[in-house]
Image (tube, grey):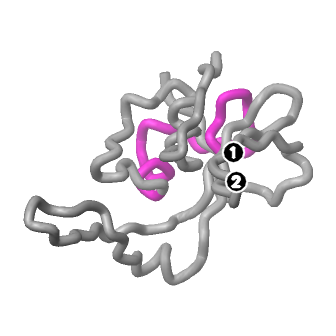
Amino acid sequence: MKLKEVIITHRDSCKTYVLKRVGLSHLLDMNTDSPTTKEIYNSNDFIKLDKPEVGCILIWTHKNDYAENGYWQPHGISEDGRIFSIKRFDYGHMAVYEEENMVSDVSWESQGTIIRLRNYDELPKPDFILKYKL
């Protein structure tokens, strides 16, 4: 799979970065924050692999209350000044398997949104390794 060039913004998350990098940005809906990470790893559009290949999506799932019950996050403000929220679920973290056994991902740090490039062997084994069905 040929990976895409990505220029990140302050609004990017690990999920938006990954979907842009592997050429699936058309799946993103920024208004509803979908698809969720859970929807991605449960989707029939992906093949689950045991070993990563270039362009695979790596997912580490969270086993916490945010993943099970979700949390309410302010999402917008109405014309009359009322803040409205959406329920979000933090299912985990996503990254992309790159060439030469490297993994790229996005993280929110104090200095802003950053792209990281790390060695696959130095990370915990992902819970899911997904390859998009072409």
Q: Residue furthest top?
A: 2
Q: Secondary structure at mark 1?
A: strand
Mark carried by residue 15: none
| Left or right placement of residue 33 versus residue 101 in this view | left
Point out the stretch of residues depicted in magenta. Answer: 38-58
Residue that carries the numbered disc 1 in the rendered image:
114
Tell me if I can see residue 128 in this picture: no
In the image, what residue type sits under mark 2?
Answer: Gln
| Most distant residue in the left direction | 80
> Foreground residue, 29 or 79?
79
Q: What's the residue type where badge 1 is placed?
A: Ile
Q: Position of residue 63 (x, y in %)?
A: 60, 76
Q: Are marks 1 and 2 in contact (CB under 8 Å)?
A: yes
Is residue 98 visible in the rendered image? The answer is: yes
Q: On screen, 54 above or below 72?
A: above
At 49% from the left and 21% from the top, the residue drawn is: 134
Mark 1, mark 2: which one is toward the viewer?
2
Please tell me the numbered disc located at residue 111: 2
Which picture quadrant has residue 6?
A: top right
